[in-house]
Amino acid sequence: MKSIFYFTAKNGKMVFPDRGAGMLRSYLIASEGKEMEAILGVRKKIRSNQQNRFWHGVVCKLLSDYTGHTPEDIHYFLRQKFLSEPEDVLKIPKSTTSLSTIEFKELIENVQIWASSDLGVVIPDPEPSGEVGVI
């Protein structure tokens, strides 16, 4: 079984939030005598709940209303159009759940530009809360 432990690096030490250090210690005790693997990297902040609500409640909803397609179809279409690798023959898009907050912001901006220029649909900018028009 693999477990992920998050921490902040400070002065060459690992500083764990809340009970993280105790949980890591318990995990190590339970794994006594086993070879372990540690892979370290800078944690990327994944898209926020506010961004996700704006995406589905504003972006996909506006384009769904305009085209007559379901919001789910619009979501898949936009992922395929904006999150597929150009050289990918099958055009299998990345999941929006894997995007960082910055990547998700860039996706929304790209869709805003495309919707405005290709469809004449204006998608408003999210407010700082990320919830324009979402109830």
Image (spheres, grey):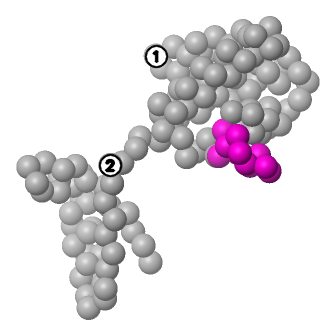
Q: Which residue, given by chain and number where applicable, does mark 2 sit on? A: 42
x then y, percent, for residue 121: 77, 11
Residue at the limit of the structure toward the left, as seen here: 11
Which element type, helix, strand or loop, lies under badge 1?
loop
What's the residue type where badge 2 is placed?
A: Val
Depth check: give the residue in front, 95 or 54.
95
- Left or right: 72, with 45 as reference point: right
x then y, percent, for residue 11: 8, 49
- Left or right: 94, with 25 as reference point: right
- Left or right: 2, with 72 as reference point: left
Residue 37 makes an appearance in the image: yes
> Does 115 appear above or below 88?
above
Q: Which residues are magenta?
A: 83-94
> Does 12 appear above or below 3?
above
Predominant secondary structure, magenta span: loop
Q: Quadrant of the N terminus?
A: bottom left
x then y, percent, for residue 86: 70, 40
Mark 1 vs mark 2: in front: 2
Which element type, helix, strand or loop, lies under badge 2?
loop
What's the residue type where badge 1 is placed?
A: Pro
Q: Which residue, given by chain and number where applicable, does mark 1 sit on? A: 128
